[in-house]
Structures are given as C-alpha cells and as structure tokens.
Image: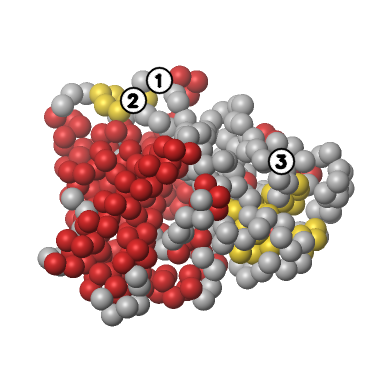
Amino acid sequence: MAETGIVPSADSDTAPAYPTVRTGCPLDLPPRVGELREERPVARVTLWDGSRPWLVTRYDDSRQALRDPRLSADLHRPGFPFISPVQKLQQNQDLPVGFLRMDPPEHTRQRRMLIPEFIVKRMERIRPEVDALVASLLDDMTRSGSSADLVGSFALPLPSLVICRLLGVPYQDHDFFQEQSRLMLDQTAGVDQVLAARAELRDYFDRLAVHKAARPDDDLLSRLVAEQEAPGHLTHDEVVGMAAVLLVAGHETTANMIGIGVLNLLETPDQWAALCEDPGLVPGAVEELLRHQTIIHTGLPRVATEDLEIGGVTVRAGEGVLIQLASANRDPRVFDAPDRLDVRHPPRRHLAFGFGVHQCLGLPLARVELQSALTGLVRELPGLTITKSLDELAFRHRMNVYGPVELPVTW
C-alpha cells in the first residue's frame, strides 16, 4: 500500500486485533505495530469489544494528536476506546474519574493545583534524599547476599518510598497499596476485584485525608486538604481521588521503567559498560531508555469531539483514537537507528511522557529518580548480571504499564 497514510474505510476487513502480542524479543515492539507504522500509520484496529478505533503509530502524527483539543481524554464520552473490559469499568459503573481523564478547563484547573509540587526546582531539592534512599536500598541488597530480585528489592521500593514521603503516606502500608495498584492496572483482573481494589484505596485515602486535616504535616496531601479542600476549591472526594491517582502513577511507572531500563542495558553490555566507565552519561542514557522502552505500551486513548484529520486520514466525531507512544518513539523518520539503544546519543524530544496539556505532571520527579537509581547501580554494582535469559523472564504484557515482573540478578 502506498505510504500516503490513507487507510481503508471503516467497513473494510483490515482492522487487526489490538493490542498485539509481543511474539519476538520482549524488549521490542510487536512486529505488527512496526508494519502498521510503515504501511498504514493511521489505521483501524479492533479491540476486545469489537470497537474499531484509529491507531496512530508515527511520531509527527502522534505529536499532532496529543496537542489537538478536539481529541478528548474524557472516558465518559461515547466512542472512547478501552483496551480491556477492566478499563471500561469506570464508564459502565459511572465511577468518578481523576483529573487525568478530564479535559480543559477542569483538567487545567486541577492540574495547576499540583504543578508547584512537581516543578524542576522543587524536585532537584529532593535529589539528595533520593540519592540517600538509593544508597540505603543498595546497601540492604548487598548486605543480604550476592543476588536479589532487582524489581522487588530496588526498582519498586525506591519510587514507592519517594511518593510516600511526598504525599505523606506511611510507607509501612506499601504492601497494601501496591497490591491495590497492581489490581487496578491489570487488564485481566475481574471486575469485582478491580472495584474492590479501587474502593479499598479510596477508603484508605479518605481516612488519611481526614487525619491530615486534624494533624497536618509538611506533605502534599496535607497541603491539598488545607489549601484546596478547606477553602472549597476541591471537594473531599476530589482530594481523595487526586491522592490515589498520584500514588498509583507515582510508583508503578518509575518502578517498571527502572526494571526494564536496567534489563535493556544489561542485555546490551557495551552500553552498560559505557555508563560504568562514565556515570556522567546517565542523564542522557535515561532519556534514551525512556524513548527505547516506552512503558505506556498500548497507547494513550482519546475520542474525537469533532471531525479532524490525522496523517491524511479523516477521523469522525465520536471515533476513538489510540496514540501509540512506544511506536512513535521508534519512528525512523525522527530517530536514527531507532531500534538500537545508544546511551551516547540521547533523543532530543521523545514522547515517553506524552505531550501537550496532558504531558506527565511528574516527569521532573521521574527523571530525578531514574537518574539517581541508574547512577547508584553503575557505581556500586558495575558487575551486575542477569541470572535468567529473556525467554525465562515474565513480563507485564496484560498490564497498562509494561515491564519485567521480576529481574533476578547477581553481582
């Protein structure tokens, strides 16, 4: 088919099932996604419920779509695409949604309340504390022996500790909230399980917010209660929902990025060796890993509120769109040799954090955590080695956020 971007009509039978399973290397995109990017960059795909949204796979088209106000993030709008039955749960049950699933102006209003908490200057001030947590976790690992599961011992505890301290959540409750988070992000979990996990987490933050109102501390949740809920800018339920979203997003994404980033580096020993020889390469390496291993791997969902054009294709009002960030970040039109990991040539403008009004609010925090984690590992454990092959490792194929389930290593 010609590389015009024009795809067959909605009545055709050329809408492949989606998401596509990774049948090859688990560190690479499914081959079918790459084929679509080259042959039909804006193409119909078929989801579990028979709906056929458009899948956007090229960089320029994705960037355009992410900044187009005619594409809504509101999952209550008819035609919104859901990757799994679990994701559709909020619409079917008419459950409240957080600001991530809102459009301006309400999204903008709530986001502005959080921006001061995550600005670069503020995150740089906590870098020494993050460095200390990295050192402590690595010390615990090495004192307990010469092998460990890097996910359970390091990649997951680090961002969990950090977001707990920022929010004012007791870390001793981490087993509880990590299990609720896992269930809420699992595309294969039962509806009853997800509803229960969601209710448990909201009840937890309901009690914690009430406690912060009576006994405020120097943390984000205390400030939300005092500065937003007390004056009436947010309801109590909105504060609870906002805190739950920040907790889940604040540890799941970074934990998986640490895990798959380290795995990718260890699978390309020359890149790991380069960082061990020169830890000054770490900031650029983090950006390259974010591009190469974009963990939001099934796409950002949107629905058109008006007719619009993406990549030469007309998307009608009410039609769903999935913006495939992982594919966009491997677009050879933008990145040289995009399937190769090269820590010496970090990308200039990857889309791992999204783009536009919904760009990830916590990106300054994620960068600090990832840089600190990787610096600590290459300095303290340069001999790090994986003890299983890629074929033996389990991955989160059916989760919203991709990464290895565990990462057994030795040093």
Judge from the rendering whether residue 18 lies leftward or rightward of residue 169; answer left or right: right
Position of the C terminus, as image quadrant, is: top left
Marks 3 & 2, CB-CB < 8 Å contact: no
Q: Is residue 383 visible?
A: yes
Q: Nearer the viewer, residue 302 or 288?
A: 302
Residue holding disc 2: 408
* Disc 2, SS: strand
Q: Residue at x 51, y 60 (%)?
A: 101
Q: How many marks?
A: 3
Residue 48 image point, x, y percent: 65, 38
Q: Is residue 257 visible?
A: no
Q: Residue at x 64, y 64 (%)?
A: 71
* Disc 1, SS: loop
Q: Amino acid at mark 3?
A: Gly
Q: Amino acid at mark 2?
A: Pro
Label 2, residues with CA under 10 Å away: few <14, some 14-19, many ≥20? some
Judge from the rendering whether residue 70 lies leftward or rightward of residue 349; answer left or right: right
Residue 398 image point, x, y percent: 52, 35
Judge from the rendering whether residue 173 lies leftward or rightward of residue 331; answer left or right: left
| Mark 3 or mark 1, whichever is nearer to me | 3
| Cα–Cα span, label 2 and label 1 | 7 Å
Mark earlier in primary sequence (2, 1): 1
| Mark 3 or mark 2, whichever is nearer to me | 3
Q: Amino acid at mark 1?
A: Lys
Judge from the rendering whether residue 209 lies leftward or rightward of residue 108; answer left or right: left
Marks 2 & 1, CB-CB < 8 Å contact: yes
Mark seen at residue 50: 3
Mark earlier in primary sequence (3, 1): 3
| Cα–Cα span, label 3 and label 1 | 38 Å
Is 200 drawn above or below residue 74 in the view shown? above
Q: Residue at x 71, y 60 (%)?
A: 318
Residue 371 image point, x, y percent: 34, 51
